[in-house]
Amino acid sequence: MTIKWYPGHMGKALEQIGELIKRVDVVIEVLDARLPASSSNHKIQELRRTKPWIKILNKHDLADPSITKAWVKLFEQESGVRALPMSSKQSTETKQLIKLCKLMAPKRGKPGFPVRVMVVGIPNVGKSTLINTLAGRSMAKVGDKPAITTTTQLIDLHNGVVLNDTPGVLWPDMEDQDGAYRLATSGAIGANALDYTVVGLFACEFMLRRYPEKLVERYKLNELPGDGYGLLDAIGRCLGCLKAGGGIDQHRAAEAFLRELRAGKLGRISLEEPAKEVVETVVTEDQFTSE
Ligand SMILES: Nc1nc2c(ncn2[C@@H]2O[C@H](COP(=O)(O)OP(=O)(O)OP(=O)(O)O)[C@@H](O)[C@H]2O)c(=O)[nH]1
Ligand SMILES: [Mg+2]
């Protein structure tokens, strides 16, 4: 099944982002730390030019820490880009962001001339949560499903920074279907645009390949099933997802599995990592600089 999700408000939001970007000093692009490549919107990247750009690898509390570190190093190699792992619900972690915005726009941040910042990213990645944490109160609506924010909103932090919250935006042509399935696994695609069983099977196959030990631990498996279908059955049995007449309800099992995965119940998981050569270079550089 092909995944595609581009509700009407997204095209309009992309146009607004294209206009707003001309009048802001810094852009904060919120990525999902579990899938930093697939959660980056190339349509927004195309608008960048030389604009100071901060990439937040959000929800890092849910991602594999060593893989997040490799992504951060990789992104920081891009000119004019700063990258930070973050958990946008934690005010201790978000504090440094204000300082960084001011540092990246040294001519602004004075009375009457606030640093104008726009927060962009795909749906459900934590943009509004980040803004609320920075504001210290609930200014923007947040929710555990994509497309909660559908219009832009300007929020003055009263500390020399004003923020634009923007709706989560995807792109119409989801040619990279592997990436689209990772987005669906993370919760960035609307429930009406996907088949839970198929996405659940994709997530099962990935976990069997990449994190089998986490499956064994969470679902008390005596032996690892040979494929996604077998795993979905084992999960359904463990979580009590049964059909009325007997047998496993695979649809319910898939839905429950995705819910658990997204909530971090299986531990910290990254759905993608930088190419192996890049990780090796980063690790070598790390050892070199820590000596
Ligand atoms: N574990 C974890 N959850 C987070 C984090 N940041 C946000 N969330 C959760 O992610 C969900 C989406 O948050 P929002 O702030 O509404 O996301 P958004 O990017 O504004 O989404 P749209 O408005 O739909 O584009 C909510 O359930 C948040 O509680 C984080 O750092 N870690
Ligand atoms: Mg939002």
Image (spheres, rainbow, N blue to C red):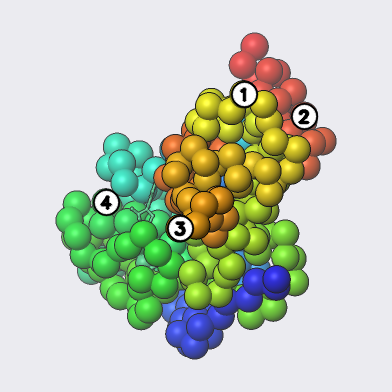
- Between the residue at mark 2 and the residue at mark 1, the CA separation in whole angstroms equals 35 Å
**Mark 2 or 1 closer to N-term?**
1
Helix, strand or loop for disc 2? helix
Helix, strand or loop for disc 3? loop
**Residue 222 — which label?**
1
Q: Residue 8's spot in the image, x, y percent?
A: 49, 88
Q: Nearer the viewer, mark 2 or mark 1?
A: 1
Q: Is residue 256 above or below residue 269?
A: below
Quick one: label 2, few (<14), some, or many (20+) residues within 10 Å? Answer: few
Amino acid at pointer 1: Asn
**Mark 4 or 2 closer to N-term?**
4
Q: Is mark 4 within 8 Å of ligand 1?
A: no
* Contact flag, marks 4 and 1 (Cβ < 8 Å): no
Quick one: label 3, few (<14), some, or many (20+) residues within 10 Å? Answer: few
Q: Look at mark 4 in the image and give the residue it sits on.
A: 133
- Between the residue at mark 3 and the residue at mark 2, the CA separation in whole angstroms equals 51 Å
Quick one: label 1, few (<14), some, or many (20+) residues within 10 Å? Answer: few
Q: Look at mark 3 in the image and give the residue it sits on.
A: 244
Residue 34 can be seen in this image: yes
Q: Nearer the viewer, residue 141 or 206?
A: 206
Image quarter hosting the C terminus: top right
Amino acid at pointer 4: Thr
Q: Nearer the viewer, mark 1 or mark 3?
A: 3
Q: Look at mark 2 in the image and give the residue it sits on.
A: 280
Amino acid at pointer 3: Ala
Tell how many labels. Answer: 4
Amino acid at pointer 2: Glu
The quarter holding residue 92 reads top left
